Image: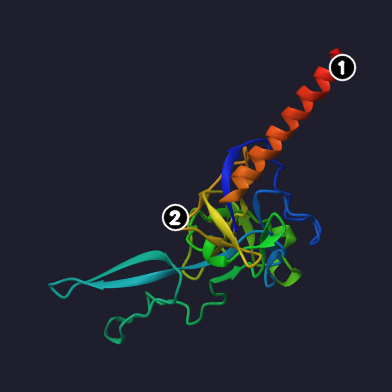
Amino acid sequence: MAVLVAMPAAVAQVPAAHEPVDSSPPRGELWPLQPLSDDSFAVSTRALALRRDVRMYQWRAETGVDGSVRWSREWADALLETPAALKDDEHVNPGVMPFRGATWRASAVELDGHPVEPALYSHFEDWTPLAVAADTLPPNLAASFREVDGCLYSGEDASVPAIGDLRICWETLPAGPIEGAIRLDGGRWVAGVEPVGRGSQGEDFAFEELGRGYWLLAGLLLGVLLMYFMFRGRGRS
């Protein structure tokens, strides 16, 4: 059994998402074996997870304690239903949500050539925006959306949205270095007692054998030193 502990050292940079699927995983970093893809929008990246967030600009009705009705507009990730008693011809929301939010998670992640149990990193919540460009969309969608601040927008003017406009953004849960102690159990990395945290690009990871491993290393070093002094003494005689 072995544990993984953080030690300061240089480490290779994480390969870009467009690199081949069979790229070798960098040592000391979580490495998804396959890119994640949102095929509907031709968005692809190599990460622990990919999330699509869809919002539609809609009317919301709120009733006051005195029975008055207050209407507001907001970006919502699901259809906002208006109570039948409050419906009118002026405040009408679209009847369908053309697209829904979705999340894709890596099915196979490795660390230094060994598979990693998802529970080891399932607590990570540091989602990072993933900018997309409208010119990479499939032709049927490129005519309906344009890029605004890294997201896709379906309306005429993002600064003055209209009811029914869509805003679609993507986020990733990055791969990369981790920090903390984990153990190799049956050829798979599993979490230790304490949850691991995010590491940095300036950290690498080294293996440290438990029990007799410490004494084995010390014995090897002592043997090398003894051989050095023996040969040095013979050279002087």
Would residue 60 be found to the left or right of residue 33 on screen?
left
Report the Cα–Cα distance between label 1 and label 2. 53 Å
User: Where 20 sits versus 4, above or below?
Assistant: below
Mark 1 or mark 2: which comes first in sequence? 2
Residue ID at (72%, 34%): 223
Q: Residue type at mark 1? A: Gly
Residue 214 drawn above or below residue 99: above
Vertical comparison of 174 with 93: above or below: above
Q: Which residue is painted at 73% across and 58% down in the image?
A: 135
- Residue with the mark numbered 1: 235
Tell which of 26 and 127 is nearer to you.
26
Q: Amino acid at mark 2?
A: Glu
Q: How is the image coloured?
A: rainbow
Image position, residue 114 (x, y; %): 69, 61
Residue 209 showing in the rendered view: no
- Residue 229, quarter of the rendered image: top right
Out of 37 and 174, give the one closest to the viewer.
Answer: 174
